[in-house]
Image (tube, grey):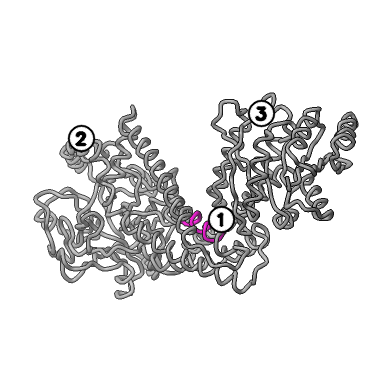
Amino acid sequence: MKVTAVIPTLNPNEKILKVVSELKETDFEKIIVVNDGSNSDCNYIFQKLESEYGCVILTHQKNFGKGKGIKTAMAYFLENPCDNVGIITLDDDGQHTIKDVVNCANALLNNIDKLILGTRNFNSPNVPFKSKCGNKITSKIFQFACGLKISDTQTGLRAMSENLIKIFISTVGDRFEYETNMLIDCKENNIKIKEVLIDTVYIEGNKATHFHPLRDSYMIYKRLLKFIFSSGISFLIDILLFTLLMYLLPISSTATKILTSTVIARISSSLFNFFANKNLVFNNNNNLPKTIAKYYTLCIIQMLVSSLLVSGISFLCTSSLATLWKILVDIFLFFCSYKIQDKWVFSKKDKKTNMKRIIKGIYHTVLSIIFTALCCLILITSLVTTVFFGPSQEYKNLLVNTFMETSALKFIPNIYFSKDKIKEMTVGNQKQINAYIDSMNNTKIDINPKDNISDKEKSDIIIENVTGSTYMGKIMIIKDPSRISLYTIPEFSHKSRGKLLSEVQKELNVTAAFNGGAFFDENGFGTGGMPKGIVIANGKLLSNTASEYTTLIGFDKENRLVCENITAEQALKIGVRDAVTFGPVLLKNGEKVPQLGSGGGLNPRTAIGQRADGTILILVIDGRQPHSLGATFNDLAQIMLEYGAVTAGNLDGGSSSMLFHNGKMINSLSSAVGERPIPTAFIIK
């Protein structure tokens, strides 16, 4: 047999003598045994192997590990040329049968350019649990991370030619990780692997194994973990910079802000990632300009795809969370990017890219991501179902109201409940609430805006932060209520387009502006050109789509805040000058108006209130974002009470919640695609 047998061993017993005897009987003329720091009690075995069987004994003075033992034998083979074409490594305890050793050696003679692996069947019932789990987990990791579909990554039965020995002698690692790194080097050096099925034999449950699960598993996975660590740090740099820039960049268009933030964050994180991957992970010494050109070609494509996907998902999902969408999108792109980096960017050989392999790798990655997404969808559906059919009516109402107050997610409660049941949880007995509001009018608190407001008070605007357990927001305090009036677009229709609030403030050159009343917005794709309910501006009725009573929020001619359930005719009769339809009423005569169910869901909110001295309070709450889930109507009422309001009402919210001051939006918009066009807005001169 023109193949040299190599047996690295530590503290062997006499079973090694049987292994060597069988090798000799099957014409293995040259056998190298590496004593990897065995106890002196084993000296007689090595003496017998040398004197009786003619083995070459190579001795380590201390234990270095299996990988070091194999490399010691490789060095001896290269330094002492013979007619043998290569070596075959095997264990010392008889786990590899002589039949399998011969089959693998013959496979090498017929496939001189390939690494031959004797692969075990781990579905066999006699495989120890530790070995079964360790090998299967490692094989799956290799299939995904390295693109190597190998049945047995830890097999010790391996055959290789002299040319391959010259490559593998430089492979990193001295212990069990060496065998794993050898497989990675096969991929990086385009060395093909041939698997030969062998018997699965374990002696006494693999009792003699020197594989230490914690230490050697870490060594096996260390190289893979370096890539994950490098990518993880780059990912954190990218996300943190993106989030910081989303808050700091003075760009009103959120879509433009997303693209700008993505570009800056990606350039910074990619520079770190490139040099970390090149020098620490792949140990790549290829031409730097060519490699970096490949890398940034990938980065530019990935950056554009990320931006398009984040913006696209945000457009389709009303009230989207820009940072959350980016995290999910970039997790998906991470797996695709790894495959391309591994097979193209940092490939050590400048050979033509095997596009079929890249496409196949990406295809399997996409399938894995789809499967993961389906699992996440099932998990989320299970959680929603648990809340909807759980014992807590409060949480059920809260979740239903949260969904129903969005444009795109209203279908979810309809899957679980009838329309009447949803109406009961969201609308309830509105007549009872209206009757309660009417009864509160009997103890009316007069609001008397000051006539002698100083010039400083007239111009002063105070802005404060408000926080709660589920929300963050801003409250604007204005002493002079006469500064507030209603802006409307020139023409209301379902075909016309509303106005962006930033455009309103810029064109009118006003100090501040915030969103107004309801408008038609079918599934979140409305044009913002047609208001719902009543619109009164400068004492004139501009629009009325309400059939009868509706909640009106606005001001009368005495600059008093009006929050009433009335008709358009009644509103004009009591002297309303500017008003829009929304609601509900939050405060009446200094008392909270009872809200239905949970008091609304957790969503972005805009509300307006007035103190007894006429001071106006404008409250905008961020929502549907990591830093702020949103507020309920009860939360708004409590904040207004704490700031001294006696009257307060809720305005349009969700992705329409906006508050501008001196040309800048001071709240965090929940819509990642930018401002919504709206038909009405309140302005502050």
Q: Is residue 477 visible?
A: no
> In the picture, residue 455 is in which quadrant?
bottom left
**Residue on which the image places disc 1:** 236
Drawn side of residue 46 relative to residue 219, left or right: right
- Which region of the structure is painted magenta? 333-342
Q: Is residue 379 magenta?
A: no
Label of residue 115 in the image: none
Residue 428, given in percent of the width and then of the height, sits at 20, 37
Instruction: Compare residues 521 and 472 and report the one nearer the observer.
Output: 521
Disc 2 + disc 1, Cβ < 8 Å:
no
Drawn side of residue 373 relative to residue 169, left or right: left
- Marks counted in the figure total 3
Disc 3 + disc 2, Cβ < 8 Å:
no
**Residue on which the image places disc 2:** 421
Residue 230, given in percent of the width and then of the height, sits at 61, 56
Label 2, label 1: how far apart the Cα atoms are: 44 Å
Instruction: Compare residues 442 and 467 and report the one nearer the observer.
Output: 467
Label 3, label 2: how far apart the Cα atoms are: 64 Å
**Residue on which the image places disc 3:** 202
Drawn side of residue 612 relative to residue 580, left or right: right
Q: Give the mark nearer the N terminus: 2 vs 1.
A: 1
> In the picture, residue 581 is in which quadrant?
bottom left
Question: What residue is at 17 percent from the left and 60 percent from the top?
Answer: 535
Question: What residue is at 29 percent from the left and 68 percent from the top?
Answer: 500
